[in-house]
Structures are given as C-alpha cells and as structure tokens.
Amino acid sequence: MVGNDGEHTQGRAAARRTQGDARRRQALADAAAGVAPERAEAPGRPAGIGRFRCVVYLCGAPRTDLAAPRKECVEYAEAFGWEIVEVVEDRAGLLPPGGRSGLARALARVAARDAGAVLTAWRSMVSPVVQEYDEVAREVEKAGGFLHVMDVARDGRRAAR
C-alpha cells in the first residue's frame, strides 16, 4: 500500500461497510446458500451454511450394472463436498426423459429445494438426443437447480470437459 505521503506501508485496510452494504452482502450470502428472503429474517434460521446438496441420477437398460457409474458419481460429489440426498436409478432403457419416473423424482427433489443439482455420469443417461437433454436441463433450471454431467472416459479417468 502507498500512504498519503507517498511512502509504501504494509498492512490491511480496515473494512468500511455501511449498514446497508452489510445487509446486501448478507442477502447475497443467504441467496447463495438457498435461504429464502422470508426465512432469512425468521428466528430459528440455521446458524451456518449447510453443504450443497445434489441428487445422483443414473439410467440404464433393465439388466445394466450401474455400480461403477454410481461409485464414480458418489466420489465426484464427495470431492466437491456435496451432500447426496438420494441416488435415483432408472431402468428405463430407451424411454424418452418424460417417461421416466426416476428422472421425475430427481426433478421433484430440486423443485422442493431438497437438492440444488442433478448429477449424472453421462449425458446419454439423461438423453442421447440433444433437444431432449436441453429440455431436461431447462426443467432443472426452472426448478431452481442445475444439471451436472460428470463424463468418465472409457479407461476410468475423468474426461476434461
């Protein structure tokens, strides 16, 4: 830092926040934590910010073994410190996304604010059709969350995307 007289000084500048600025910053933190404005002022508000919550969604053919992608998704979520509220497995095969009860349940968890994201191993688990995938992503966003795809390369390493 440079002082008024032109000399270099070390040290940290004191924070000069107005009361309004402090309220605005608190409102931003509450919004990021998923605390609704009406709950932010209420007594009994949680003291700290909880972990980010997600739903793991997996889809495969009726006799497909989903243990490996489930393990990868759980490890991926844990690496980010995300709490998994539910692991949903659909055995729907080639059904379009609108016909899958598990995907509807995952979306309902986001809409109920139980989770902030739907995490899946591959885009094709949501839909191999781009328009269908995009529609599901929009539905998750309308519900207040996001769709996160964790692509895994064939050799087991995470793909750089």
Image: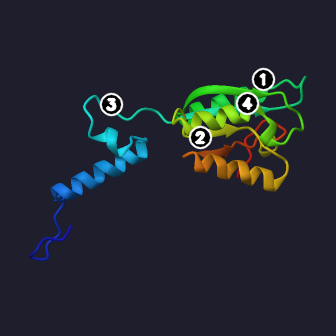
- Residue 132 coordinates in the image, percent (x, y): 79, 51
Location of the N terminus by quadrant is: bottom left
47 over 118 or under it: above or below: above
Residue labelled with disc 3: 46
Residue at point 43%, 41% (across, down): 34
Q: How many labels does the image show?
A: 4
- Is residue 12 visible from the viewing direction of this image? no
Q: Which residue is drawn at 89% across and 25% down?
A: 62
Q: How is the rendered protein coloured?
A: rainbow
Marks 4,3: beta carbons within 8 A: no
Report the residue marked by disc 2: 117
Residue drawn at x 59%, y 40% as measured from the top left: 117
User: What is the number of the mark on residue 102?
Assistant: 4
Q: How far apart are marks 3 and 1 (CA)?
A: 35 Å
Q: Position of residue 82 (x, y in %)?
A: 54, 33
Circle 2: residue type: Ala
For badge 4, the amino acid type reads Gly
Q: Report the mark closest to the observer, 4 or 2.
A: 4
Label 1 vs 4, first from the N-terminus: 1
Q: Position of residue 88 (x, y in %)?
A: 70, 27
**Mark 1 or 4, which is nearer the eye?**
4
Q: Is residue 137 visible?
A: yes
**Residue count near mark 1 (Cα–Cα under 10 Å), binned few <14, some 14–19, many ≥20:** few
Q: In this rendering, would 56 be left or right of 156?
A: left
Image coordinates for residue 133, horizontal then vertical, percent: 76, 50
State the SS at label 3.
loop
Please give the residue where the numbered disc 1 appears in the rendered image. 67
Judge by depth and name the residue closer to the eye, 5 or 68: 68
SS at badge 1: helix
